[in-house]
Image: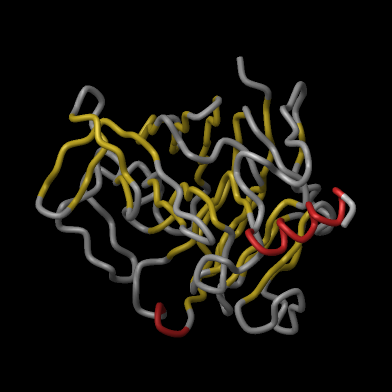
Amino acid sequence: MRPTTLAIVLVAALGASPADPISEAIRPTATITLFNHQNLDGWSTFLHDHHAEDPLHVFSVRDGVLRISGEEWGGIATTRTYRDYRLIVEWKWGSATWGERKDRARDSGILVHGVGPDGAAGGNWLESIESQVIEGGAGDFILVAGLRKPSVVAEVRQEGDQIIWQRGGERRTITEGRVNWFGRDPAWKDTLGFRGSRDVERPTGQWNRQEVIARADSLTNIVNGVTVNEVTQSSHAEGRIQIQSEGAEILVRTAELHPLQ
């Protein structure tokens, strides 16, 4: 068996390793516009039931804005892989909610360092690390397991069963679940329209600016100019970027990468 053939067999059997990406990750040296406001060039879509097909038009461009209806679970991901960047996504909630989440907090997410096959995480998403987008929880980090489990190290405090980011707190290795942003309301409820007393996410219908700084194996979440969460020693340091469809309509007007300063 030729070496190239052997490599293909191993990738098929084991999935792509975060340390050994199939294509070399791009490190931006100038601004990269991921969404061109006209079409979905540079992106691929994946849905739980329809995979690469999109008969319900879950993903579309309207008046220069990317609309993700949320009607079917899945995501839209960059076709290329990236590392060491400042990602800026400007988004706002739409009015539609669907299915089991019709009356629950509007939910989506920005997945970074996505690797492996489409749908490896729950039949919906890439194995990745999520910069959470949910009412009351924008800026949480969630470890999205696929063929493997991502892991990070964070400085945290514990409140009941919640792990919350706190600069200077206990250093802890996280191998599953989430690290909540520092101001997440302890009385958070999974209800439509939830607002916490310290939320930096703007009210429904207003634009938010969510940034993810990926520097080597560290990740920082910034929501509307406020640093809300940080993790280090990430098991994943490069990969695709994916925005979720998860039961709520979300609109995106900006998705771009900037070089690190």
Q: Quadrant of the N terminus?
A: bottom right
Locate residue 70: give its quadrant.
bottom right
Q: Residue 112: x percent and y percent? A: 57, 45
Q: Residue furthest top?
A: 261
Q: Quadrant of residue 18?
A: top right
Q: Residue shown at 75%/74% (left/top)?
A: 52
Looking at the picture, tell me which residue is in the foreground, 32 or 225: 32
Image position, residue 153 (x, y; %): 34, 34
Q: Where in the figure is residue 13, as x and y percent of width and height?
A: 67, 64
Does residue 86 lie above or below 242 as drawn? above
In-image side of 35 versus 115 (left or right): right
Q: Residue furthest right?
A: 2
**Is 27 displayed left or right of 169 in the figure?**
right
Q: Is residue 192 depicted above or below 178 in this figure? A: below
For the point 59% across and 59% down, the residue is: 126
Q: How is the image coloured?
A: secondary structure
Q: How many marks?
A: 0
Residue at 67% across, 27% down: 258
Q: Which quadrant, please, contains the C terminus?
A: top right
The one of 165 and 101 positioned closer to us in this rendering: 165
At a point 42% along the width and 52% down the height, the residue shown is: 143
Q: Is residue 188 left or right of residue 106?
A: left
Farthest-out residue, left: 160
Horizontal arrangement in the rendering, residue 209 relative to residue 136 (left or right): right
Say if 103 sits above or below 144 in the image: below
Q: Position of residue 61 (x, y in %)?
A: 76, 63
Along the viewing direction, whichever of 65 and 160 lies nearer the viewer:
160
